Image (cartoon, rainbow, N blue to C red):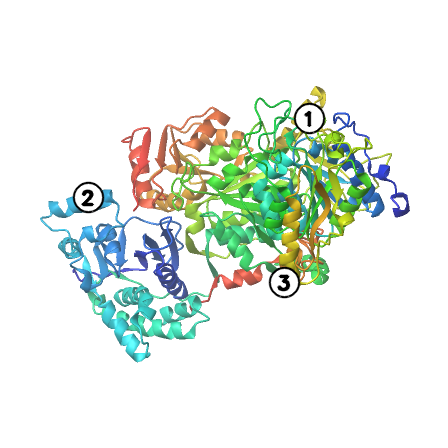
């Protein structure tokens, strides 16, 4: 496919029937990913989108790039394997909040320690949609969505805090109904050198009747003129500067990101909370040990001739294990 | 001591001590010294799941011929503390010797808290029956009564002398040398020229010249003390001139070498005993060189590698779930990818194995079996995961399972596992075990020139797929194996999912497609059964017409072959079928081999007789006898000789349980 043709989001659409509920916040995420890919003139075959399990995970079937729909909670290690074996690929990883922060919580933490160059998006709606609305890790304590028998007995995890604590070097939050802003966040996350984590507020119209589109949009609280007062606001509009420019910035920039991430309820910030390209990526760290890694990553190495003769020279290893002659 | 001529170059030697005290190095120095002197060695390592303080020991055989297993008897027991002596003195043969520290003779059994209560009670009973007390001195007296040679070595004095000579201010700085003194004394007692030990010290401590010099000086002092007992001693080691190259390696290294030679470039692991050794060896050798062992015109074809570079990327993951899934993600990009683990880690990998199977991903899992269930005995041996490997995961998912029995099979299977994985596009579980992984031996350099890399059906670049002729990763059109494209390839975009899927890889719940996909996946297993040659599936040893036959798998091969040498020399008529490919199972060949045998003896390191059960399931033929062991200690050849002899003579029950080992 010539690059000039790959300019429209629909060029990244498949013909697979989409079975999300009408009004699902996932549509906004799917659309913005396709918009971002088009905007960035991505070559479809150089992109791998990896997902876990749940409504969010079906996204890959609707995107015309390589798509890997994996296991519940395991999107990150699958995506990491793809990226490590062939760092020339652009890797985008998708999870739901149950997928990424519940069953996959251990991987969430360890992905931060590595700082692989990829973007991880969590479709954050507070519920397990595909299994009919159980409470998920970002649902607040005491909240009773409609399919719960009792108010949520667990407190919520803060994905932004967790990502920062784990070491993610780009941390953002988007809102799936602010498509243009979300598209720009995705582009920025993909362009970031290192591990980028993007939390996307994504209302589940079927099971989360608390954090709805109307709620985020402030339809329940109107000003004197009768206009809704949206809860979601953009960090950039308030002059928030998330960028670490020198090592000395890290502490201050982390602290302000943590402070902002505490805001919830009446004011919910979206945008980039933290950005730091000074931390070496995992790929760069490997390159320090294996100098040829960037040009000859595992997936692109020759292992045999056309006739199948192995070309790995194990002679040196065998020599080190060889007993010298005794005569 | 009778002055009859000594046994030359057929020795069982043991050294023990607290973990963390350098016993590893001393056993290594002893083994390498023997090897450098032209002898062959086989060493077995036993240790607790502990960092420091618990008892560990090495049983080592030195022989003129290649050795494949350990024996229970000890001819020379090298000790420098009380526990090893207390635990193992009874295993010393009447014509054997004990090297010991005379300052420890008053130590009582009760002073050694790390001896298990059961073992301590056993020893007390033994001593009381002989009218003895319960100190080291009493144990030595019981040995002396039997004729055992006692070799006192005043370790502390010798170390003090070394400290003086080398102006070492604190004895504690060189107290670890006690190990090497025990080795030196052993070689003195055995009359083995000291220069081999000096060279061996250089091999082991290559980058620490002062350590080498001091240990060599100390070792020599102990050597001279040992020498005093040599003339009357029943065992000797003599150097053998040898020019042909041999390897001295562990089973973990053998498997790693096979995988590297087979083109593995990506491996994940989470730390676990006894699997981590392999990954650590790979990590230490991550930068590879390219070239070919082949010579002649074939080698010229390999000239293209000049502008290439090779390395293996080893990634330590956060858990075994990440290990198996990360390795699978890597495999999707076309790299030969593996993970290595042991039972508990393998238990966590189930879902990932199912995903790799339904998505037809070539993935290799090296499974180092150890004693289960649960944490079991983490550092001890078992072959308990055969059925688990066959059935691991929910639903029905094809996989190939192969099991290696010795170092050469470990190398070959390490290599072949990737061929199978790629040719049949499914996970391959390669079973090895603790006994194999942790033992080391000298072996002939294996001839690997027949091995060829087979990547199976790959989609070539410039493949001609288009909008009108789209690529289908799970194409049902042309046999069960669909052409495989990899992530990043142009023109072949595909999708994967753990759901049942259509030819493109999109989710389906269509009943017709479901059947076609199930049948496609399992047909690949039939193909593998048809294509994989017999010599990679099993091997038969012994007379084809023997009425009795042993059926076994995995590392029991070593002690079995050593036992059979003795049984055959004594005229026993028994064959041995060693099964290497467990799935797909070579049912017809096994049925043919087992037909008309009147005694069929299953030999396995597990409680349930797992292979015996599988043979029955696959062929309808039951074993008449099983010889099993599950105490965590590998089978020795003498206990196998006894058990098999009893069966052949009709004096054994259907089930024999072996119990030896400390």
Residue A49's spot in the image, x, y percent?
72, 41
Is residue B486 or residue A104 the one in the foreground? A104
Q: Position of residue B81 (x, y in %)?
A: 25, 59
Name the outermost residue toward the top. Answer: B511
Chain letter, disc 3 residue: A
Quadrant occupied by the C terminus of chain A: bottom left
Snapshot quadrant of residue A18: top right
Q: Is residue B456 visible?
A: yes
Looking at the picture, do discs 1 and 2 lie on one chain?
Answer: no
Question: What element does badge 3 sit on?
Answer: helix
In the rendering, at what x and y percent does residue A219 appear? 76, 30
Q: Nearer the viewer, mark 1 or mark 3?
A: 1
Q: In front: mark 2 or mark 3?
A: 3
Name the residue carrying label 1: A209
Quadrant of res B380: top left
Q: Label 2 vs label 3: CA separation? A: 56 Å
Neighbour tally class for label 1: few under 14, some 14-19, many 20 plus, Cα within 10 Å: some
Q: Earlier in the sequence, mark 1 or mark 3?
A: 1
Inspect this view and state whether residue B457 appears: no
Residue A288's disc is 3
Q: Cα distance, mark 1 to mark 2?
A: 69 Å
Give the number of marks. Answer: 3
**Chain of the residue under the numbered disc 2 shown in the image:** B
Question: Eyeballing the image, is B76 above or below B405?
Answer: below
Q: Position of residue B227 (x, y in %)?
A: 24, 69
**Residue depicted at x 89% and y 46%:** A2
Q: Which mark is residue B121?
A: 2
Q: Is residue B242 above or below residue B586?
A: below
Badge nearest the viewer, 1 or 2: 1
Side of A27 where A258 appears, left or right: left
Callout 3: few (<14), some (14-19), or many (20+) C-alpha neighbours within 10 Å? few
């Amino acid at each position: 496919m010539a690059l000039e043709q790959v300019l429209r989001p629909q060029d990244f659409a498949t013909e697979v029937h989409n079975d999300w509920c009408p009004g699902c916040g996932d549509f906004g995420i799917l659309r913005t990913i396709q918009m971002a890919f088009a905007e960035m003139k991505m070559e479809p075959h150089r992109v791998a989108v990896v997902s876990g399990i749940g409504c969010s995970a079906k996204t890959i079937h609707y995107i015309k790039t390589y798509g890997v729909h994996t296991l519940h909670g395991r999107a990150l290690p699958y995506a990491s394997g793809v990226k490590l074996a062939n760092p020339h690929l652009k890797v985008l990883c998708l999870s739901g909040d149950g997928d990424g922060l519940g069953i996959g919580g251990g991987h969430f933490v360890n992905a931060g320690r590595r700082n692989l160059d990829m973007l991880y998006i969590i479709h954050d709606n507070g519920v397990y949609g595909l299994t009919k609305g159980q409470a998920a890790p970002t649902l607040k304590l005491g909240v009773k969505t409609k399919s719960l028998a009792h108010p949520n007995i667990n407190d919520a995890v803060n994905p932004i805090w967790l990502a920062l604590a784990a070491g993610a070097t780009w941390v953002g939050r988007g809102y799936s109904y602010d498509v243009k802003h979300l598209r720009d966040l995705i582009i920025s996350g993909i362009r970031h050198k290192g591990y980028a984590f993007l939390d996307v507020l994504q209302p589940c119209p079927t099971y989360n009747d608390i954090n709805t589109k109307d709620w985020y949009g402030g339809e329940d609280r109107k000003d004197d003129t009768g206009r809704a007062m949206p809860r979601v606001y953009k960090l950039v509009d308030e002059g928030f500067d998330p960028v670490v420019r020198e090592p000395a910035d890290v502490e201050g920039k982390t602290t302000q990101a943590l402070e902002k991430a505490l805001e919830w309820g009446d004011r919910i910030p979206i945008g980039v909370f933290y950005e730091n390209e000074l931390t070496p990526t995992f790929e760069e760290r490997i390159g320090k040990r294996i100098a040829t890694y960037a040009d000859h990553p595992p997936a692109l190495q020759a292992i045999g001739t056309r006739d199948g003769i192995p070309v790995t020279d194990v002679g040196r290893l065998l020599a080190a294990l060889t007993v010298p002659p005794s005569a | 001591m009778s002055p009859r001529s000594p046994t030359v170059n057929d020795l069982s030697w043991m050294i023990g001590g607290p973990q963390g005290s350098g016993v590893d190095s001393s056993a290594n120095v002893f083994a390498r010294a023997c090897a450098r002197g032209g002898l062959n060695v086989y060493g077995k390592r036993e240790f607790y799941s502990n960092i420091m303080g618990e008892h560990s020991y090495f049983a080592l055989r030195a022989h003129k011929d290649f050795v494949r297993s350990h024996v229970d008897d000890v001819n020379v027991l090298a000790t420098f503390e009380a526990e090893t002596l207390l635990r193992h003195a009874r295993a010393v043969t009447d014509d054997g010797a004990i090297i010991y520290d005379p300052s420890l003779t008053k130590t009582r059994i009760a002073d050694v808290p790390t001896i298990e209560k059961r073992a301590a009670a056993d020893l007390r009973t033994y001593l009381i029956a002989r009218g003895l007390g319960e100190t080291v001195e009493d144990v030595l007296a019981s040995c002396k009564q039997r004729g055992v040679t006692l070799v006192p070595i005043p370790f502390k004095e010798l170390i003090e002398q070394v400290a003086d000579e080398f102006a070492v201010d604190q004895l504690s700085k060189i107290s670890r040398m006690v190990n090497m003194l025990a080795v030196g004394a052993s070689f003195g007692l055995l009359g083995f020229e000291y220069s081999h030990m000096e060279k061996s010290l250089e091999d082991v401590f290559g980058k620490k010249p002062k350590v080498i010099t001091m240990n060599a000086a100390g070792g020599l002092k102990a050597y001279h003390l040992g020498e005093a007992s040599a003339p009357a001693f029943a065992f000797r080691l003599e150097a053998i001139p040898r020019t042909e190259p041999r390897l001295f390696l562990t089973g973990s290294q053998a498997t790693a070498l096979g995988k590297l030679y087979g083109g593995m470039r990506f491996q994940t692991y989470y730390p676990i005993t006894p699997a981590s050794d392999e990954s650590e060896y790979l990590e230490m050798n991550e930068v590879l060189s390219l070239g070919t062992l082949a010579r002649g015109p074939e080698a010229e074809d390999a000239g293209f590698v000049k502008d290439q570079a090779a390395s293996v990327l080893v990634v330590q993951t956060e858990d075994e779930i990440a290990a198996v899934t990360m390795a699978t993600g890597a495999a999707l990009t076309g790299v030969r990818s593996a993970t290595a683990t042991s039972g508990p880690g393998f238990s966590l990998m189930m879902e990932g194995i199912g995903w790799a199977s339904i998505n037809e991903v070539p993935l290799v899992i090296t499974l180092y079996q150890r004693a289960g269930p649960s944490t079991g005995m983490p550092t001890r041996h078992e072959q308990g995961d055969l059925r688990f490997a066959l059935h691991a995961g929910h639903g029905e998912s094809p996989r190939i399972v192969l099991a290696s029995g010795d170092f050469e099979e470990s190398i070959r299977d390490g290599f072949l596992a990737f061929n199978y994985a790629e040719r049949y596009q499914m996970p391959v579980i390669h079973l090895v075990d603790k006994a194999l992984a942790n033992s080391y031996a000298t072996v002939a350099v294996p001839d690997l020139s027949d091995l060829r890399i087979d990547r199976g059906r790959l989609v070539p670049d410039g493949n001609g797929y288009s909008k009108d002729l789209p690529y289908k990763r799970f194409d049902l059109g042309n046999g069960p194996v669909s052409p495989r494209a990899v992530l990043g390839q142009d023109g072949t975009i595909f999708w994967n999912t753990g759901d049942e899927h259509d030819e493109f890889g999109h989710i389906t719940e269509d009943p017709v497609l479901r059947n076609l996909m199930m049948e496609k996946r399992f047909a690949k297993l039939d193909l593998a059964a048809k294509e994989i040659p017999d010599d990679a599936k099993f091997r038969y040893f012994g007379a084809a017409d023997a009425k009795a036959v042993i059926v076994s798998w995995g590392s029991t091969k070593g002690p079995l072959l050593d036992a059979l040498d003795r049984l055959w020399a004594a005229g026993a008529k028994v064959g041995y079928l060693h099964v290497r490919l467990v799935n797909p199972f070579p049912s017809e060949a096994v049925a043919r081999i087992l037909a008309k045998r009147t005694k069929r003896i299953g030999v396995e390191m597990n409680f349930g007789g797992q292979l015996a059960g599988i043979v029955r399931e696959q062929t309808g033929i039951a074993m008449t006898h099983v010889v099993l062991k599950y105490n965590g200690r590998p089978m020795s050849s003498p206990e196998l000789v006894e058990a098999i002899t009893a069966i052949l003579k009709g004096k054994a029950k259907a089930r024999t349980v072996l119990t030896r080992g400390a």
